[in-house]
Amino acid sequence: MAKRFRRMTESDINLIIKDLNRWAMGDLGSKLTWGLLEERFGFSRQSLQAKPEIKAAYDTAKLALSGGIVKTKEQATQENTELLVEIARLKAELEAYKQKEQKWMLRWQQIAFHVRQKGIQMADISKTRPEKTAVPSNTDTTQILRPLDKEIPRSL
């Protein structure tokens, strides 16, 4: 027996296009076929494809779904949770770096102060070393900087 379909009105076309746009955003799932549209709206695949605006909306939705752009709600929720954890970790890491920078700045301010107290100009310290001289080892550097690492005395 032949199944009878009703004629498609302008409001039907607009409703189908709206649903196809929602499908493209993933609101109605990740599977889209002409068969699903036939069941949903009661029009044949041929009559749906005959309308260029519906065909264009269908092609756009299929492209969005096949391109992995659209995610299910579970995927989006899981990805959101992972991103929130990553943001929290990065904020903590940033805070740790800010504290290290603060300590580093204080240390070099103290060293600069004590170097000046000994009558040495900072411009003399910033000079490049002679080419043939070796860079001091970490142990030597620590011993050189230790007397300069003490706190800056409070001014009266």
Image: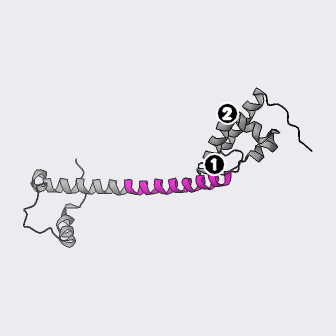
Q: Nearer the viewer, residue 125 or 5?
A: 5
Q: Is residue 9 visible?
A: yes
Q: Is residue 62 left or right of residue 110?
A: right
The stretch of residues the image draws in magenta is 72-98
Q: Residue at coordinates 76% horizontally, 39% vertically from top-left?
A: 46
Residue 129 on the magenta segment: no
Compute the Cα span from label 2 to label 1: 20 Å
Image location (x, y in percent) of residue 102: 33, 53
Q: Amino acid at mark 2?
A: Pro
Q: Any mark on residue 65, and which?
A: 1
Which quadrant holds residue 5? top right
Which quadrant holds residue 12? top right
Residue on which disc 2 sits: 52
The correct choice, above or below, for 56 with respect to 140 in the image is above
Task: Give SS at disc 2.
Answer: helix
Which quadrant holds residue 142? bottom left
